[in-house]
Image (cartoon, rainbow, N blue to C red):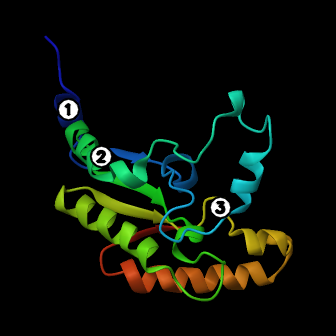
Amino acid sequence: MNASAKDLAALLPSRFTLGVATAAFQIEGALDEDGRGPSGWDVFAARPGAIVQDHSPAVACDHYHRMPEDVALMKDLGVDSYRFSLSWSRIQPGGSGPVNPAGLDFYDRLIDLLLDNGIAPMATLYHWDTPLELDQAGGWMNRDTAYRLGEFAAIAAAAYGDRVTRWVT
């Protein structure tokens, strides 16, 4: 008998949360699209030999374009929760100052689609993708970066706090 992923998920105790997790930089791709600013990871990844076989995160898993398909796969697997990271560089390209409406919209659509499919969103505010301007100003060795993250957290909470109940710093 071949059991489907959903059949296997149904065998878990009812209080068990079956979750999956990703990091924006490792999955989204679309590094130069819709107003996303560069991050320190962009610079690192562009160095020859920094990534095995000189692969590029420019496309990655193409989650930015395939997000509806990815959410459908999660639903088919019986996933209850999805921990994803918000790309600071996509939402606030310079790490301070104005927000990027297209970046906010991407995560709005993701969160709504997750909820429509019975998957609880869990948002990570920071997953090692410091906006390049902050990285070049000293990154986490510069105390100002912590204040900028606080501002970014307030932006994310205002945009998504009505739907996201679990947050990770």
The quadrant of the rendering that contains the C terminus is: bottom right
Q: Secondary structure at mark 3?
A: loop
Which residue carries the number 2 mark? 16
For marks 2 and 3 on the same chain, the one whose residue lies earlier in the sequence: 2
> Which numbered marker is on residue 129?
3
**Farthest top residue?**
1
Question: Mark 2 belongs to which amino acid?
Answer: Phe
Tell me: 37 left or right of 112: right
x and y percent of residue 13 in the render? 23, 40
Q: Is residue 50 above or below residue 112?
A: above
Name the residue: 82% across, 81% down.
143
The one of 28 and 34 positioned closer to us in this rendering: 34
x and y percent of residue 118 in the render? 19, 56
Which residue carries the number 1 mark? 11
Question: Mark 3 belongs to which amino acid?
Answer: Asp
Name the residue: 49% across, 79% down.
100
Name the residue: 30% across, 46% down.
16
Dot 2, crowdedness within 10 Å: few (<14), some or many (≥20)? few
